[in-house]
Image (cartoon, rainbow, N blue to C red):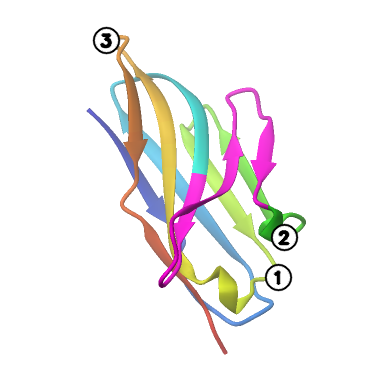
Amino acid sequence: QVQLVESGGGLVQPGGSLRLSCAASGSIFSIDDMAWYRQGPGNQRELVAGITSGGSTNYVDSVKGRFTISRDNAKNTVYLQMNSLKPEDTAVYSCHAVVRTVARAVLSVWGQGTQVAVSS
């Protein structure tokens, strides 16, 4: 059993910053790709940023230069630093990970989501 738990969401004014964290726990042998997704009101879920086990990153165009994804492999944790936030960044942010368990199963695991609201 593997779980992802997000934290760090909240209400912030336009131009502000937030840092999201997502910690994995359970019978983990290793974690491959990790990513942050978001789903805003009336929108489909979209990939915001991803990071490989080796540290390669990718971002959706709308957040490039503002958001930074990183990970701490020793802590099984992925982060999303969000700067210069805009009202259109308002969404539920969820993390995702591809996890190899101690039993050598490969699992696609989602967190429960954390709300980010950008408003004055």
> Hey, which residue is sitting farthest top in the picture?
104
Give the mark nearest the N terminus, 2 or 1.
Answer: 2
Going by the numbered disc 2, the residue's amino acid type is: Arg
Of the numbered discs in the image, which one, if any, rests on residue 84?
1
User: What residue is rendered at 32% in x and 9% in y?
Assistant: 104
- Residue where numbered disc 3 is placed: 103
Q: Secondary structure at mark 2?
A: loop
Residue 49 appears at what percent x and percent y?
59, 46
Residue 38 appears at what percent x and percent y?
47, 57
Give the mark nearest the N terminus, 2 or 3.
Answer: 2
Give the residues in magenta: 36-60
Q: CA distance from mark 1 to mark 3?
A: 42 Å
In the picture provided, is 26 more to the left or to the right than 61? left
Residue 7 lies in quadrant: bottom left
Residue 116 appears at what percent x and percent y?
47, 69
Residue 41 lies in quadrant: bottom left
Nearest the eye: 74 or 6: 6
Mark 3, Cα crowd under 10 Å, few <14 / some 14-19 / many 20+, is: few
- Residue where numbered disc 2 is placed: 66
Asked if the magenta segment contains residue 51, the reply would be yes
